[in-house]
Image: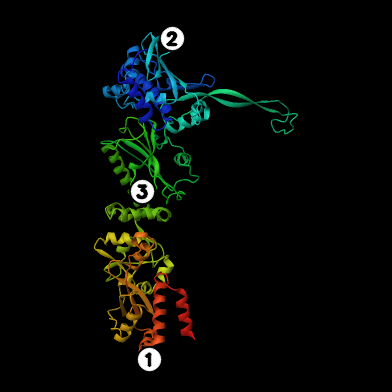
Amino acid sequence: MKQFKTESKRMLDLMINSIYTNREIFLRELLSNSSDAIDKLYYKSLTEGLSGFTRDDFAINISVDEQARTLTVSDNGIGMTKDELENNLGTIAKSGSHDFKENKTGENADIDIIGQFGVGFYSAFMVAKKVEVLSKAFGAKETYLWSSCGTEGYTVESAEKDAVGTTITLYLKDDEGEESFGEFLREYKIRELVKKYSDYIRYPIKMLVTTYEYDDVECDCQGECTNEEHHHHTPKQVKKEQTLNSMTPVWRKTKAELSDGEQEKFYKEEFYDPQDPLKVIATSAEGAVDYKALLFIPKTIPYNYYTKTYEKGLKLYTAGVMITDKCADLLPDYFNFVKGVVDSEVTLNISRETVQHNRQLKAIAASLEKKIKKELASMLENDRETYTEFFDNFGLSLKYGIYTSWGANKDVLLDLIVFKSAKTGKYVSLKEYADALSVGQKAIYYACGKSVEAIKAQPKVDCAIEKGFDVLCLTEEVDEFCLKLLAKYNDLEFKSVESEDFTDGQVAPEIDKAVSDKILEILKGKIVEVKLSQSLKNHPVSLTSKGDLTIEMEKVLSKIPSGQGAVAEKVLEINANHKVYNKLIETVSTNEQTFESLVKVLYGQARLICGLEIDDVTELTDTIFELIG
């Protein structure tokens, strides 16, 4: 028994119990090692001019023995000598693949080898009580068997093996309580793990699997007879060799290699969506950073998209092996709706379960961000119907991208934001709004409300449209906060219609002082000012605000515990040309009760128009009935 060439017991305990968080990773690691071994032999054949080697000659085989509780992974790669078994398996964290990568030269130096740290093999001890490695190196006559039960050490002995390559046999641990190591002997589980982690290893991963054949009793019905006396179907189990992996990922195929609907089929199967994606984005880069990516924008909102359980991220592959199911660092939050895969030889952490945070990953993320923005901008300009469908589903994420970053991301998102037009009811971008300004218009006008219809019914919106100005309809809670952070689009300020009098230079007269004083007394603490307006058309009253905090902001903040003290400074505007103003003048000094009732009704109406709740609905209705009576 030989000891490992490091502080073996402590080190191997760390490898098994701390570095890996998911024990099913062991199969990925063993298959990756087999793939590396084949790569080395194939590379050797290319660089040394060896004949008789093609990619089709290589394969990885998996077999199980349920009675013996063994799982075996074998390959016909380059194999290992006795010294290499000692160095690569007897020295923890010694990586032959890493050395191979460092020494590759020439035109074939781009052959991918995933192994770097030399610890992946030891993940086998998470599920196995004993591991045997039988290996015959290319060009060698001798075969050696490496065997270990874990931290106590290992043995290396002479053995017999006909073909070049390596066979790794795992003797699985006994099942204890909820720990079921026997699941890794089940066909379905092995299929699942190969599909999940190793589907795109470039060599076939083969296994004998159970299939069913039927013995049919012949009759002259030619297979159409339903009479059981004539036509019997007796199932019989048969073991047949099958290739478990796809080998060639769809994102590495050229347009000529792709079949119709292949990318869409991949999306639906990989991301469990019954519908085709709204948009497919295939992209790649070479140079400072190399990667291939296949991205998808879903057609519908995922069921948990606007919940805390939703996780953003792209699947990350290296050399055909899935490293992580959701690499969040590849997408900014405002593009979190994008699904897809990225394939790149990035730097991994020691367990190869996660990616190290480095400049390479940031460079890929920056490149993907630009590509996604470009595709969305093209959709907005050239396929408005599809963009409308997209924005209805995911536009809120783009707006939050501006708001939550305090405007830092506006250069990326500004031209992707659209709002409904009060004039047309259709989406309009800020650029389109600015390009269509009416003569003399010096601002981008907006109004807030629950719907486009509710906004169009607002007195000042009605007046603005009559004057030829369009109004952006802000129907989401984040909308006004978003525009406040933007402040301007080019040189145009964003202005709420609340703050504007849309008149032809006609100045509203001063409100009667007695009326003003009495209204402020009755509505003390509820409004800060009362004035006359010339831009309410046939509407008697409107409630606006002054200062930075608008009425819409107050409504949003009132729903948040920390923002319930935020109250807009409200201004009661009365139509100078409406008969209700004359009624106020008439009753202010002659009928105090009627005057007070009128003021309360006007204030209640103004709150309803701008979407605010009524403090006391019963009091308001009683007051209305008193006036009617």
Mark 1 closeness class: few <14, some 14–19, many ≥20 residues within 10 Å: few
Query: Considering only vertical position in the picture, is 19 above or below 604?
Result: above
* Residue 590: numbered disc: 1
What SS does tag 2 mark? loop
Residue found at the far bottom of this picture: 590
Q: Residue at x 72, y 34 (%)?
A: 226
Name the amino acid, label 3: Phe
In the rendering, at what x and y percent does residue 467 appear? 34, 74
- Provide the residue designation for mark 2: 160
Name the amino acid, label 1: Thr
Q: Nearer the viewer, residue 483 or 404?
A: 404
Q: Nearer the viewer, mark 3 or mark 1?
A: 1
- Provide the residue designation for mark 3: 335
Q: Residue at x 47, y 75 (%)?
A: 618
Image quadrant occupied by the N terminus: top left
| Residue 336 appears anywhere in the view | yes
Q: Nearer the viewer, residue 468 or 554?
A: 554
Q: First in sequence, mark 2 or 3: give its number.
A: 2
